[in-house]
Amino acid sequence: MSIAKTGALQDSYKYVNIAIDSFDGRLLQGRIYHDSLEEEIPFGCISEMAICLEKLFDELRYPMKSVDQRTFVGIKHVGPSLRCADEAGKKRLQGKLAEFCLHVKYRFHSTWQGDIMDLRNGGTYSFQSFLELMEYMDRSLGHGSDIMHGLGKRMCEVAVRNFSHFVMGGDVSHPAVDKRMDFCNEFDLREEIGYMLNPLPVGAEEEKLIVPRTVTVSAGNFGPATFVVRILFRRNATWQGTICWKEKRCQVSFRSFLEMLLLMQDAALCSEAWDEEP
C-alpha cells in the first residue's frame, strides 16, 4: 500500500495528531489522525492506541524498526486496516479533553523515542520509551503518581481477570503483602508493578523472597491464558524480562514494557486461532 506523504508542513508524515476524549478511571480513549489516513482511528485504551500506531509506522516505514516485534506464535494478530487519504478528507482532530502532536523518531530497543507536544499549551516533552510517554500522558491529563519507595521486590503476581477489546483489568499482589491491588488499565498495571520494583526506603530490611509474577487473562470466550512474567532489568527507560504462556508452553523474552503489552494482546487475539486447530 502506498502512503501519501503530502501535507501543509514539511515532513508532515512524521507527525501524528492524537485527540483525547476521555481519561475516566485512567482509561485513555480518543482518536488518531494522520495525513495518510482517510479517517480517524478510534481507540479505547492506550494498548489499542499503541497497536494502531505500530501498524501505521510499519505502513509508513517511518520510523523503521531496529528489531522485529516478538510474538508467541510468529504471526501478529493486531491492528485495523489503514487506508490512504484524499486531500479533501483531511482535517485536524478536536479532542474533548486534550490534543497532542506525537513525533516518534526512532523505535530502538523495541520501544519508542521522540517528542510529544501539547497542542493546547505548546509544551513539548521528549521521551526515551513508551513507558515514559505513558508517564507523561498520565501526568498531563491530571493523574499520575511519583512512587519514591516500594517493596524492593523483583517479583509480583498479576491476575488479569477481564479482557475486552484490548482493555485489561485485574489485581497485583505479592506474598509479602496482605492486600491485592486492583488495576483496570495499563496505567494502573504499570504503577502497581513499579511499586513492587522500586527500592525500599533507606534502612528498611528486604526479605530474600523471589517468586514469579503470574498473569491470568480471559479474552472473551477464550481463555483463561496464564502468563508467568519475570522482570529482570530496567534499562533504556523501560523494562526487560521474560513472559511465559503456560497453556501453550511458549516463553518469549521481552525488551520493553511496550513489547510485554503487545505480547499479551497478541496472545489474547490469537487464542481463537489456536483453539480451532485440530
Image (cartoon, grey):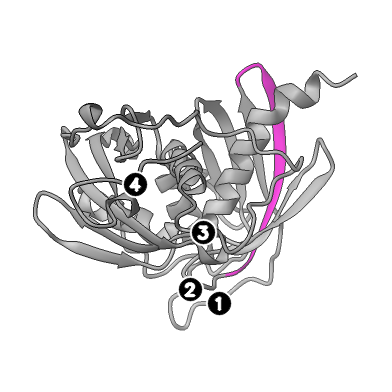
Left of 193 or right of it: where is 276?
A: right
Of the pair 59 and 126, the residue shown nearer to us: 59
Q: Callout 2: few (<14), some (14-19), or many (20+) C-alpha neighbours within 10 Å? A: some
* Residue 5, numbered circle: 4
Residue to which mark 2 is pinned: 200
Of the pair 266 and 241, the residue shown nearer to us: 266
Q: Callout 4: few (<14), some (14-19), or many (20+) C-alpha neighbours within 10 Å? A: some
Magenta-colored stretch includes residue 150 = no
Residue to which mark 3 is pinned: 64
Q: Label 1 amino acid? A: Glu
Which numbered disc, 4 or 3, marks the residue closer to the eye? 4
Which residue is drawn at the image coordinates 59% and 51% (left, top)? 260
Residue to which mark 1 is pinned: 205
Res. 40 image quadrant: top left
C-alpha span from label 3 to label 1: 45 Å
Residue 43 versus residue 157 in the image, above or below? above
Q: Could you tell which of marks 4 and 3 lies nearer the N-terminus?
A: 4
